[in-house]
Image (spheres, grey):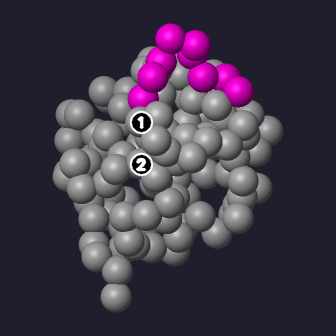
Amino acid sequence: MSARHSGGCQCGALRYQFRAPLADIAHCHCSICRRCSGGIVTTWITVPLASFRWLAGTPREYASSLSCTRSFCPTCGAHLTLFTSLSPETLDVTIATLDHPEQAPADRHIWVQSRLPWLHLDPQLPEEDQESMA
């Protein structure tokens, strides 16, 4: 059985939980993630959608592309999840919002064709020009 993990936003208005292994974790370098998060990279874990639930609060949603909807806290603005219709049985959760992000190191880079040329992060990890939806 997979471990239970929880997290939430900065202000505490949103809390979530999922039951899945801490695997399939990627540093995303796409320009959409940069603009939505305000960071230079966003690290995501992909979990089964059925394993995820909101424990407190109701997130706001933003359709950042034709296939992706992101959720964020309407109070503090923290970016928490991404749902893509390209993989409708999964949900991406931002590692930084986990209660214990130190337990979830990335295993690859995605969308490296958009990587900022001066960023050198975890160079030993495999890289994907875009993202494979395996």
Q: Secondary structure at mark 1?
A: loop
Residue 47 appears anywhere in the view: yes
- Whether 98 is drawn above or below 10: the answer is below
Left or right? Give the position of 43 relative to 5. right
The magenta-colored residue range is 113-121
Q: CA distance from mark 2 to mark 1?
A: 9 Å
Q: Position of residue 127 (x, y in %)?
A: 61, 42
Q: Secondary structure at mark 2?
A: loop
In which quadrant of the rendered image does the C terminus lie? bottom right
| Magenta: main secondary structure | loop
Left or right? Give the position of 105 relative to 51. left
- Whether 60 is drawn above or below 98: the answer is above
Q: Position of residue 21 (x, y in %)?
A: 38, 71
In which quadrant of the rendered image does the N terminus lie? bottom left
Q: Which residue: 47% across, 18% down?
A: 119
Quick check: is 103 in the magenta stretch?
A: no
Q: Position of residue 53 (x, y in %)?
A: 40, 65
Residue 70 appears anywhere in the view: no
Q: Which residue is mark 2?
A: 106
Q: What kind of residue is marked 2?
A: Ala
Q: Which mark is residue 122?
A: 1
